[in-house]
Amino acid sequence: MSSVTDLNAVSELQAWYDSELGQQFLAQERQMIERALLSVQGSRLLQVTLDGRQWLCDTARAQHAVLVAPRVELGMEERTLIATPEELPVQSAVIDILVLHHAHEFSADPHQVIREAARILRPGGHLILLGFNPTSWLGLHSQFKRNQGAPWRAQFISQHSLGDWFKLLQLSSLGGDSKEFNYPLESNQWRQRIRPVAKVIKALPFKSGNLFTITARKDVAGLTPLQPQWNRRLLGKLQVIESKATSAGVRRNKS
């Protein structure tokens, strides 16, 4: 299968994350993923992302963790697997926790990204998906800025639609979270001025934050979860980038 991930959008998204507004979103995303990780457990974790510089799972209790990104980047994690989210070169049914960070939203085939996630999860394993909310200020703002690159031209897929996809793949939704209620203006001064509006939106009974997470469990009737050996051989013959990493990153990926 050829790559259908928009690599131009990867560059645009990285540039946006380096902006003041992008940094604000990234901080919220990190908190949301850390919170979701508290409710799952397992020794084998994969984070599938478009920005290989961003490791968002420092609080995970997984013994072995690998980041998957679509291309080589400066400042990547020590143990990074270069692959597209549509075709993950990982054995089926071996991953305990898969964190999907916006990867499905910049693919021409988001269904395939979710199918791949379901394929490599073991029975009883968990998917944590983080996405942009189409029914939010960000979704509204994107209608006016879609020609200005990522994140505005992402495929904003609703939580309801994702829930339907999950059912077809034997993934049971366990709930989620919604954060970041400010109108996504680049000017921090203007964001502060309209912050009272964000408080009103946050108080509404439905999840209307710019960001959302969904946690889902892979339920396969009649199958007993196996305990495959997770070691360097799982990554054998795959393109893995070795780069300077933090001491935390080295500890995380030691066998």
Image: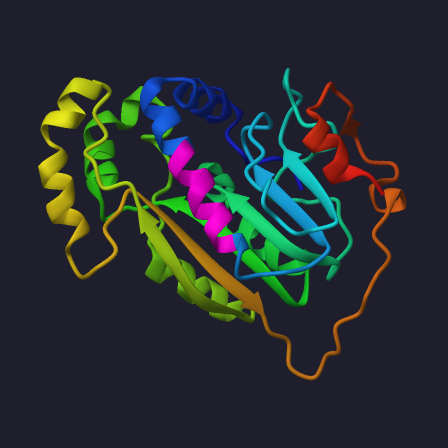
Residue 82 position, x and y percent, is: 70, 31
What is the magenta range? Answer: 27-36
Quarter in which the N terminus is drawn: top right
- The stretch drawn in magenta includes residue 143: no
Q: Quadrant of residue 17?
A: top left
Residue 55 position, x and y percent, is: 58, 34
In the foreground, 148 or 81 = 81
Quarter in which the C terminus is drawn: top right
In the foreground, 42 or 157 = 42
Image point (75%, 78%), residue name: 224
Q: Eyeballing the image, is 244 above or below 138? A: above
Residue 180 position, x and y percent, is: 28, 40
Q: Quadrant of residue 20?
A: top left
Colouring convention used in this rendered image of the protein: rainbow
Q: Main secondary structure of the magenta part?
A: helix
Residue 85 position, x and y percent, is: 60, 42
Is residue 105 visible to the viewer in this orientation of the structure?
Answer: no
Is residue 226 visible to the viewer in this orientation of the structure?
Answer: yes
Image point (10%, 31%), residue name: 194
Image point (9%, 38%), residue name: 196
In the foreground, 126 or 167 = 126
Q: Quadrant of residue 48?
A: top right
- The stretch drawn in magenta includes residue 28: yes
